[in-house]
Amino acid sequence: MVTALAVMLAVAVEAQEPAGAREQSREGAVSAGLDEGSRTTNIALIDVALTDPSQIQDSKPASQTTDGQSSVPEAPAPTVPPADANHPNEQFGKQSKRILGIIPNYRAVSANTQLPPLKFKGELWLATQDTFDYSYFILVAGLAGIDMASKSEPAFGQGAEGYGKYYWHAFVDGGIENYMTEAIVPAATKEDPRYYTLGQGGFVKRTGYAVSRLFITRTNSGNSTFNLSEIVGAGAAAGIGNTYYPAQSNPWVKTYQRWGTQVGLDGVFNTLKEFWPDINHALFHGKY
């Protein structure tokens, strides 16, 4: 019983000792064991020398080598596997080319990623992808239906003919806005039209960041600046719309409405882009 209590106490003390102290204790124990073994070997050699001195020359301590170092093999050092680059935690904020495999996401840049500036050709291609992607035709269909249901342009009428008018007006509105905000104005202001994902932080912080990208963007040199591409580009697109909307509409009111709608939609899509990597990982296990 005493022996068992002693063992339990030793285990408890060892568990409370810092790692460094335990290592020192182990090293001391090994050293003590080596010294004890050396003393035992030396005593044995003395006994043998008294009986047969010729055996002393071929006898060496079992625990020592010829250079005086211990021959006891060292314990293998623990190996720490390198971080897996494919682990989800190592890939936070990683954007895919499409959201849900449908919505184009070409403008979104993964978190902690630095890209070279876009040339005008690349900016035009971004705007073209966003405007003529098959999903954009579906989005416009929904927007046209909402506009017709609210009778935003009474002159368009109702029915199939009225819906057709709402549809092509909404399509042209969005297309012009895409080219103005993603290509034409960025080329003039030397701004980067892409969305750079924050990728970490709380919901409020990241949502605020996504909305703030409507007013703050990066220049081609990597600095932050007021987002003229978004604000001026969307405003210019809304103003151009006055050339193909009915003359009897109040141009100023409709211009501000289209301007606000375009900027608001871009804010919604920025937020969706920001949280899409988390949604994709949590709900779809990175499928998309």
Image (tube, rainbow, N blue to C red):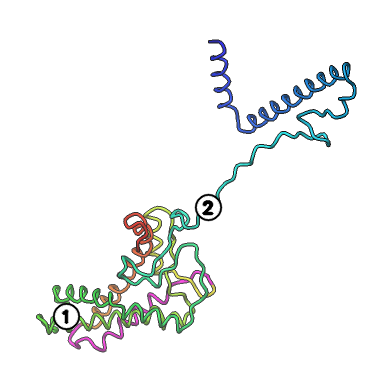
**Residue ID at (20%, 73%):** 142
Residue 96 in picture, x, y percent from top left: 39, 66
Residue 97 in picture, x, y percent from top left: 38, 70
Residue 83 is labelled as 2
- Residue at the far right: name it: 53
Residue 121 higher or lower than 101, as above or below: below
**Residue ID at (20%, 81%):** 167
Residue 151 in picture, x, y percent from top left: 14, 76
Quadrant of residue 269 within the rendered picture: bottom left
Q: Is residue 153 left or right of residue 178?
A: left
- Element marked by disc 1: loop
User: Disc 2 and disc 1: Cα gap in Å?
Assistant: 58 Å
Residue beneath label 1, please?
153
Residue 67 higher or lower than 112, as above or below: above
Residue extent of the magenta highlight = 222-249
Q: Is residue 248 magenta?
A: yes
- The amino acid type of the residue labelled 1 equals Glu
Of residues 158 and 17, the one nearer the viewer is 17
- The amino acid type of the residue labelled 2 equals Ala
Residue 201 is labelled as none
